[in-house]
Amino acid sequence: MHRLLATILFVFSVLASAEEPPKEELVMGFVPSRSVHEIQVSASKIADYLSESTGYRIKSVTLSNYAGVALAMKSRRVDFAFVGPINYLVIDDRVGAVPLTAAVRNGQQGYHGLVIVRSDSDIQSLADLRGKSVAFGDALSASGSLYPKAALKEAGINPDKDIRSLMLSSQSAVVMSVVTGKVDAGAIYDDARLNPEVLRYYPEVTSHTRVLYQTPLIPADPQIARASLNATQRRKLTESLLEMSRDDEARTWLKEIYGIDGLNVATAAEYEGLRHVVNRVNSALLSDQKQEAP
């Protein structure tokens, strides 16, 4: 009996460590930092380009929240994805993930978060937000949640007690809530105010709002693949993503979807500093996600 059990365990360990065979169809996931509809329009174009470039059938899907990407990758319903930097750390801890490429904006492989207020607001510093209402993005958003909350703590503001926090589904929604006066301030990536769906309704948004605070540089949002995905397919995806970022037409889709100017090769080491920030500001963020994993 013991010998049979040992044999079964050995077989399972070999199967688990074996490289996944190539898939004919791959699913590419996207996080909903903007409206799902707006993202999906550009996502479909990106999927078509990568399908032609790689020779695989690639379809795109925009998940309802950041955590949904991790769950979909764990169940292998999503093979690679455009995610936020914290989202990558969570997925890596839960599933095992490999960064392929990372976004470049304004010549930097990284980006800033902003806290914005209305131009006519009397709020002049983060300390002035005590007792005010502040809109944040997804809890796993570095620019829309983690970094702004870290800055508030440094300013002597407890985000859980000293302000009225509101979590919204997208950073475009955060911008519009500030413009319309529904909240006193909002945390966004630089510069979610220029998202097409915002400009469509509020073309003068930049004159009606101002930047109260800018975060330090945040590691770039990466494009990642499941670590179990076939290595040859991961390499092909990396090559095709980089090729896409050099194509004039394809670059417009990257710009439309997340304000991305281009893509560079990414490595796991580039995100270790962010892991330390997460553990310092909210150490439960990664560990809680691990506990929730099915």
Image (cartoon, helix red, strand yellow):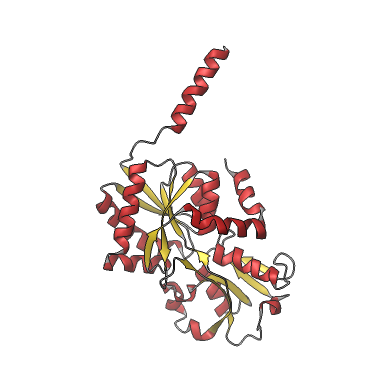
Q: Nearer the viewer, residue 79 or 154?
A: 154
> How many numbered dots are placed on residues in this image?
0
Q: Which quarter of the rendered picture does the N terminus lie within? A: top right
Residue 273, placed above or below residue 111: above
Q: How far across and how far down the image is residue 76, in percent?
A: 44, 42
> Position of 162 compared to 180: left or right?
right
Q: Residue furthest front?
A: 269
Residue under the image location 54 percent in, 13 percent down? 3
> Which of the two residues, 86 or 291, is positioned nearer the viewer here?
86
Residue placed most toward the observer, 127 or 33 = 127
**Foreground pick, 55 / 207:** 55
Res 23 quadrant in image: top left
Residue at 74% over, 70% down:
162
Q: Is residue 49 visible?
A: yes
Residue at screen point 28% across, 57% down: 49
**Residue 242 as seen in the image, left or right of residue 189:** left
209 w.r.t. 162: above or below: below
Residue 46, given in percent of the width and then of the height, sits at: 33, 59
Q: Quadrant of residue 15?
A: top left
As drawn, 60 above or below 118: above
Would you say residue 41 is visible in this rendering? Answer: no
Q: Residue furthest top?
A: 1
- Residue 184 picture location, percent across and down: 64, 77
Whole-percent x, y for residue 16 in the image:
46, 32
Q: In which quadrant of the rendered image does the C terminus lie?
A: top right
Q: Is 185 left or right of 13, judged from the image as shown?
A: right
